[in-house]
Image (spheres, rainbow, N blue to C red):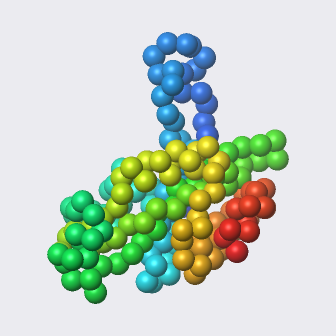
Amino acid sequence: MEQGKKKLEFNIIKNDPTDGHKGFGIGSLSLENITPVMVDVEEGEVWIELQAMHARSKTERGVRYVKSLEELLTDYPEENTKKYWIIWVAVDRKPEGTYYAGATACELYINRPARRGYKSMPEHVNHMDKAMKGKIIVHNMDEESRKRLGIFLEQHDPEMWERSSEELKKELS
């Protein structure tokens, strides 16, 4: 690894943000244990994209979202529209160590020349919540993207992969 380059890591649960008190912040959601992973379907690339948490990933920058996928594909040249997956990967800890606890996939479409895109924000928010609750929802992904994601997660941290559920491993193999 080149000096100066920071290795991207999965976020791991930290201490209780309320620090034991029962007042302000109780019931708030902590996003410290979720990491967005992106898959470029066409190129087959997989990477961690922390800025996707706030819709500021390198892929999404400079893009205005339209209301529906149909609008994007009708109003802008379809051949310029690329499909991506944003996978919300939750990490948790058990006595043996950290593991991939949940993973949910959402579609993202970007037409770079038109600077337009589409994603369902309610779906992204709901899937992020489900990943944090340990759900595995990747059956909506194409088979090749699922395999690439599985390979990426296993290579990123073989020990975390080994401690992960059989359901996750099966879905991503």
Toward the viewer: 57 or 68? 68
**How many numbered discs?**
0
Dividing the picture into quarters, in which one does residue 149 lie?
bottom right
Q: Residue furthest bottom?
A: 79
Q: Quadrant of the C terminus?
A: bottom right
Q: Quadrant of the N terminus?
A: bottom right
The residue located at (59%, 79%) in the rendering is 143
Q: Position of residue 31 (x, y in %)?
A: 50, 41
Along the horizontal axis of the image, is 58 left or right of 90?
left
Toward the viewer: 124 or 19? 124
The residue located at (70%, 62%) in the rendering is 168
Along the horizontal axis of the image, is 169 left or right of 53?
right
Dividing the picture into quarters, in which one does residue 139 lie?
bottom right
Q: Position of residue 125 (x, y in %)?
A: 43, 48
The residue located at (36%, 52%) in the rendering is 121
Q: Is residue 35 visible?
A: yes
Q: Residue furthest right?
A: 96
The residue located at (63%, 57%) in the rendering is 136
| Residue 131 to residue 68: above or below | above
Q: Is residue 159 visible?
A: no
Along the horizontal axis of the image, is 49 left or right of 157?
left
Q: Position of residue 111 (x, y in %)?
A: 26, 75
